[in-house]
Structure formats: structure tokens, C-alpha cells
Image (cartoon, helix red, strand yellow):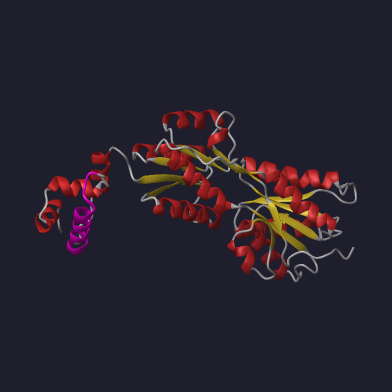
């Protein structure tokens, strides 16, 4: 395996010159830098990341904490952060928090100990005071899908309540009066906000009464959870004609439960999801969903975190994003 001394010898320069090229020093002449880089490629030399950090006093890693990177939503978040990081010469270190306070703390502290230059955190289990303390410890920490009083300029978030209201209102506007809700069993603010949006839409449109009760079921926010929740609703409420789901993967599970029992979507039961993830466009029928602009939000989070780490001005943009309803083929007018 080639060493830095091998590169210096083959290029005919000093080890110090090779080190300056590796760390992007502006003191090296362009021709010399090109020669050193070409020699590194020819010899297959790869600089040690830890050594580069020691020399430059600056890590090239961005830390990202999500609930579960295997979830399509969080996988997309990481992908879009990585797009920005790659363009600016950074790489990612990822931690999973699984919506558990202990795991979120462990992930954040591990990344801080690894001296990441910037940190993007999706945390739902930790309280605001704990996150404020971490933000004070790490000056380039940005929070996504979370609004923390006092740290508004470091928070990028979506109005979950309004998104749920929009989805439920749309179903009511199509004439549905028996509208159910499938929610996440995780005790996080997204769950509370989306449930509240659903209930308030029913009340605002004066849909709920003794003959039109609120119908809800909760399970894990994944396909199997949506399938189980839909099955539970059908056992108790065979009159329901529409269902709003906490996210798109739960909606996919709900559609499976419906079709397995002979229901047609949307002819018998209309379905709306949340996130407008890739799966929404490939379900049959294509899923009506509340769009979560995760690409824009993740890219802004990455840019803001890197700006904080380099003491550069942050983009003059509000961190609040408004949801929109993307109408496809999983909703039709009620036949009631």
C-alpha cells in the first residue's frame, strides 16, 4: 500500500507539499497540486481521514441522526443531505435514534465525539432542553422536522397539523362522512399534530356526531402496522368509506388489507397518505398524499449546518414549510 512518502518521491516533491495538497492549502502552485493528485491516483494512495482532520483541525464529516435509515422517508432525507455534502467535499456519518430518547442521545453524542464538522438531527424523543444543551455544545447543529423555541434559526420543519387537516378536508369535500384515521403508535409530536389536524377537520366541517363517530386505529408506522390498523377498523366499522393514514407506507398496508378483504380502492374506500414518498407513485391505484418537501428541507438543513460550521452567512430562508395535497387516483366521490 502506497504511503505519503511514496507519493512525494514519485512526484519529486516534499512530504510537506503532498500534505498541503491533501488538505487543500492555497499555498501550493496549481501545477504542483495537479502533479501530486495525479501521482496519488496512479499509486492508489488514499489519505487517512483522521490524519487529515488532525492536520486541518477540521473534520470532513457531517453527522446525520434519523429515526431509522431503512425507512424510505429517512433514507430519502439522508440521500438529499449527502447530495449537498458531496458537492462540498464532505462525507456522512449516520446514527439511528429509533424514536427512543436513550438511542437518540447515544447517536448524537457518538457523532459529536467523532468531531463531525456539522450535525443534522431528527429527534422526536428528546425534550427541548436536552436538544438546546447539545446545540450549545455543537455550534453547527441543525434540527429537521422540529421547532425548538430559542433555536428557530436552526430549525427546519413542516406544518404537520395543516397537512392532516388538508387531507381530511379533501375526503370530506368528496362527500365522505365516515372518515377514519390510521395513526402511528409512536408517542411523538408528529403523531399528535396529525391526529389533531384530522379531528379538527371533522369538527370544522361538522361531520362528527352520534351517527358519524371518530374512527381511529394506531400501530407501528410501517406497512404491516397500516395493514393491522386497517383490519382493526374494518372489524368495528364496516360503514367507513375513507381513511387518512399517518404516512404512505401505512397507507400501502391499509390498501393491502382492503383488497385482501374484497374492497376496491377507491370505489369502496378512498385512501390518503402523508409524505408523498416514492411509493405513492407506484401503488395501485396511485396514492393521493400530503407532500412532505423532504428534498428541499434536507438540502436546506445541510447547507445551513455547513454554513454554521464555516462561520458563513446562512441562507435567508424561513425554516417553516407548508404542506400541499397531491391528488392522484386513490380518492373518489362518496356514493353515500
Vertical placement of 293 versus 305: above or below? below
Residue at point 37%, 49% (across, down) = 90
Residue 317 spot, x, y in % from top left? 58, 41
Q: Give the image quarter of residue 145.
A: top right
Magenta-drawn stretch contains 34: yes
Left of 218 or right of it: where is 278?
Answer: left
For the residue pair 295 and 284, the one nearer the viewer reads as: 295
Looking at the figure, which quarter contains the C terminus? bottom right
Vertical placement of 192 versus 46: above or below? above
Note whether residue 259 is visible: yes
Residue 291 spot, x, y in % from top left? 65, 55
For the residue pair 274 and 13, the one nearer the viewer reads as: 13
Left of 239 or right of it: where is 136?
Answer: left
Residue 35 spot, x, y in % from top left? 19, 58
For the residue pair 167 and 35, the one nearer the viewer reads as: 35
Residue 310 spot, x, y in % from top left? 39, 38
Residue at point 13%, 48% (across, down) = 15
Amino acid at each position: 500500500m502506497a504511503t505519503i512518502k511514496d507519493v512525494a518521491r514519485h512526484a519529486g516533491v516534499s512530504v510537506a507539499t503532498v500534505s498541503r495538497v491533501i488538505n487543500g492549502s492555497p499555498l501550493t502552485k496549481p501545477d504542483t497540486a495537479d502533479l501530486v493528485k495525479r501521482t496519488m491516483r496512479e499509486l492508489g494512495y488514499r489519505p487517512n481521514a483522521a490524519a487529515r482532520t488532525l492536520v486541518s483541525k477540521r473534520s470532513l464529516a457531517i453527522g446525520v441522526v434519523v429515526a431509522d435509515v431503512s425507512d424510505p422517508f429517512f433514507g430519502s432525507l439522508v440521500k438529499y443531505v449527502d447530495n449537498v455534502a458531496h458537492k462540498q467535499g464532505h462525507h456522512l456519518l449516520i446514527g439511528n435514534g429509533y424514536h427512543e430518547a436513550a438511542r437518540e442521545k447515544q447517536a448524537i453524542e457518538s457523532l459529536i465525539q467523532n468531531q463531525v464538522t456539522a450535525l443534522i438531527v431528527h429527534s422526536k424523543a428528546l425534550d427541548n432542553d436536552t436538544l438546546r444543551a447539545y446545540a450549545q455544545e455543537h455550534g453547527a447543529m441543525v434540527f429537521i422536522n422540529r421547532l425548538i423555541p430559542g433555536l428557530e434559526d436552526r430549525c427546519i420543519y413542516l406544518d404537520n397539523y395543516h397537512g392532516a387537516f388538508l387531507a381530511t378536508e379533501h375526503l370530506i369535500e368528496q362527500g365522505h362522512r365516515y372518515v377514519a384515521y390510521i395513526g402511528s403508535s409512536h408517542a411523538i409530536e408528529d403523531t399528535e399534530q396529525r391526529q389533531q389536524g384530522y379531528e379538527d377537520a371533522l369538527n370544522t366541517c361538522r361531520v362528527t356526531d352520534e351517527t358519524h363517530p371518530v374512527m381511529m386505529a394506531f400501530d407501528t408506522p410501517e406497512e404491516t402496522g397500516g395493514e393491522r390498523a386497517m383490519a382493526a377498523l374494518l372489524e368495528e366499522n364496516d360503514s367507513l368509506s375513507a381513511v387518512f393514514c399517518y404516512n404512505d407506507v401505512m397507507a400501502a398496508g391499509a390498501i393491502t388489507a382492503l383488497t385482501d378483504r374484497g374492497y376496491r380502492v377507491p370505489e369502496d374506500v378512498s385512501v390518503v397518505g402523508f409524505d408523498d414518498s416514492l411509493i405513492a407513485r407506484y401503488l395501485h391505484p396511485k396514492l393521493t398524499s400530503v407532500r412532505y418537501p423532504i428534498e428541499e428541507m434536507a438540502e436546506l438543513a445541510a447547507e445551513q449546518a455547513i454554513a454554521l460550521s464555516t462561520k458563513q452567512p446562512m441562507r435567508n430562508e424561513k425554516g417553516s414549510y407548508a404542506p400541499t395535497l397531491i391528488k392522484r387516483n386513490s380518492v373518489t366521490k362518496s356514493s353515500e
